[in-house]
Image (spheres, rainbow, N blue to C red):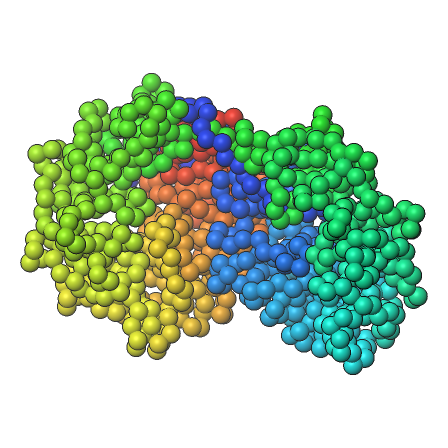
Amino acid sequence: MRKAVSLLGLLAALSVHAASSPQLVFDINTTGDVRGSAPSWFFSAGRVAYFFADDGGGRALWTTDGTASGTRMVAELPRGGSPYFSSRFDEGFVASGDLVWFWFEDDVNDGQLSLWRTDGTRGGTFPVVRDLGYTPIDLAPIGARGVIARTSDRFLSSDGTVEGTRFLEGDSFAQQLVAFRGLVYFISDYELWRTDGTDAGTTRVGGFDDDFDDVEQLVAGDDAIYIVADSRSSWELHHLWRSDGTQPRLVETYRRNPGDEPRLVASNGTVYALMGGGEGLTELWRAGPQPARVTVLEANVETYMFLGASGGSIYFETRNPNKLWRSDGTAAGTRVFEGIDITDMLFLAGSRVFAFSGAGVHVSDGTRATLVTPFEADTYDSVAAVIGDLVVFTVDDETHGSEPWVSDGTPQGTRLLKNIRADGGSEGAHLRRLGDALLFRADSERHGVEPWITDGTLFGTRLLADVAGGSGSSMPALFTPLANGRAVFLAAGRLYATDGNLTEMLRQADVYLGDDAHATQLPVIGGRAWIVYGGSNETDEVWTTDGTRGGTTKLVDIPYRDDDFTPVAANGVLFFVARGSLWRTDGTEQGTFAVASHPEQMHVAGNRLFFLSRTAAHGRELWVTDGTLGGTHIVKDIHRGEEDAFPYEFPWDEYLVTMRSAGDLLFFTADDGVHGLEPWRSDGTEAGTFLLHDVAPGEASSMLPMFERDSTAFADGSIFFAADDGVHGVELWRSDLQQTTELVRDIVRGQASSTPTNLRVIGDLVTFSANDGRHGRELWWASPANAGLLADVNPGPDSSLPREMTELNGFIYFFASAENRGDELWRVGP
């Protein structure tokens, strides 16, 4: 206990002087692979732009003012989810006052949509409501900073707070929201409606005639709302309707070309309509109380053509000939815009057009194009955004990977904005203690990915063995320390052993890995590592080793193993899955037999193996076994009857689990049909299996159906885990697994999330990575009573993404990324 107390004092001191604490152990790889952050979905919000990017820690929302210092992460997004955008004209963001709103596909509730808001700060970035169905329809600004939102399932308004978010009464077929004169208008059941965001203020404006059919588009100008709808009586006709906030009026009927729909666009408050005017003709109209035809062009127009407005002009493309046109709303001012290949992805910025392609980025003023960068540009999603006189977009320059660039429209003014995801690094992994040293794998330019060892000093950090030879990689994994001071590991599909100095191969035959590479180490029984090799004739072979060649022997043949499941050891036997059943073996033929059918998600706690299994009577529930037939049974029917307590199909990804051991107890996420997905515990008995706490009250869920292996940790009698109570965002919680379950610390105040991950136990404490919105994702510590910042490896708002924290001689070692260093081994200590 003396060591744990000493460490507590060390952590408290470090939390005060975190910025100067981290030390790089050894810069193993100064080059490394080129990795990009893949920026996407740019959105202009006045003086700044927003986009999504991945700095190595998962997808996050970023913002930029066009400068490197002003480019920063706003907030991380829930793991497993993704931004979601309407396919209708790439809508997905909307600005309202100082807020920007967007959809997010939320894995907390089976991939349903949630509605997020951001003010550009971490504390001001959070979802106001979840469980919105699966298909977004529209967003429209209302009030000072509010929004009206519509999905396939719900119709709602929000003022930017959770409390001020309400569901509105509205027809399930409401379509195409548009803001006009402080209200939001929409079509519902073939009628025009409007809303001020309240039920009382949601009223019918007026109806249409009997020939009114499907709505194609709503666009608001300064004078009125314009509506294009199909004709119910003839597929050749479409109608243009107008409403100034009162009963809509039919203003024009058009005959369309086959396959074409009219398209509306607003420019400086004036609405224009572009449509087919007969075979080989395109007509441009100015909408109004009395629509007027501007001009007729000898070209074809298509429904999903490029169409937009910028700098007081409208831009559109035609086919036969394939041209880009610009119009100021007059016949004389409608002419071909030169210098652009319309097969490229086009973007409007003032009076210029940016064209993005694999051949680079071109910019045209309408007479000729200039190549501003030859590097490949992103041509998917929303490719760019305007920030004042600058345009920000994504380019892959083959040096930094796919990263955000900025341009003023000239070659000399086009540059890398920020290298969000650091280049280089040794990509260290599998940090594991061996006596007074640490084993891990790392990538060096000279040797590839091989096993390394360190005693924590520069000169004591060295290559353990070049297994593959030269620049090839053996990809070592499953470092497994044994009681005799040796460790075994797998490399290049073979079994190796080391005492920290000499490294030797124990077996030549290829190892039947399957998904074993997702585990942390090989099963250990009686001080010896057990390993499964591929055999023959539908069988595998179980071997055991003490880390020496003489002590490496075969035990027994077993049925051909299912490689979706990693063998685990519990109660002195090895459990594995074969032929769709759960088997056990003690290394003898008579001790090898099946104990259960259709297992999922095996996990050991104490001397028991817990797993999931589905039956017709109980659905998917928690089971337990001690390795005997009599000791294998369902633990509890958590969700009574045929319903599943674990309601989602589990992908065969061993990085994701539904349960973790907490000493002799099991900690897991389940849904009892009343409380949503919440934290539970079990000791293997029905009476000892119960809900720890309804963190998100009612039917709401506070946890994901599956979580990463490192998102929980058991220390000093408490289980630490990340959860969202609907008030504080995703933050660190702890439970004593009995009566007390509580929030440890609201690291980011309010609804926003610090999203604790990579939890590791050091003494009586837990170290983890979190993002407080000021330091990026950095190293933190927690006790049952508090939490604090431990080290800011990458000073400022950028993240270092710490992981695999391990203690050695009073220091905490971990992998992290720093500017110009890439991913390397670091430590903090006295």
Count of all numbered marks drawn on residues in the image? 0
Residue name at image x 63 percent, y 59 percent: 86
Task: Please tell me in which quadrant of the rendered image residue 781 appears.
Answer: top left
Is residue 455 visible in this depiction of the protein?
no
Is residue 556 visible in this depiction of the protein?
yes
Residue name at image x 46 percent, y 25 percent: 31
In this view of the protein, which residue sits in the foreground, 504 or 202?
A: 504
Task: Please tell me in which quadrant of the rendered image residue 179 appears.
Answer: bottom right
In this view of the protein, which residue sits in the foreground, 33 or 325?
A: 325
Q: Is residue 90 above or below residue 460?
A: below
Q: Is residue 103 above or below residue 252?
A: above
Residue 444: x and y in percent read 38, 25
Residue situated furthest bottom in the rendering: 210
Residue 384: x and y in percent read 68, 43
Residue situated furthest top in the rendering: 459
Residue name at image x 28 percent, y 25 percent: 469
Residue name at image x 74 percent, y 35 percent: 363
Left or right, residue 627 beside residue 391: left
Left or right, residue 267 beside residue 12: right
Q: Is residue 74 above or below residue 741?
A: above
In this view of the protein, which residue sits in the foreground, 798 or 693?
A: 798
Question: If the image is split into quadrants, where does the C terminus sit?
Answer: top left
Q: Is residue 312 above or below residue 675?
A: above
Residue 458: x and y in percent read 36, 20
Question: If the image is split into quadrants, where does the N terminus sit?
Answer: top left
Residue 190: x and y in percent read 74, 76
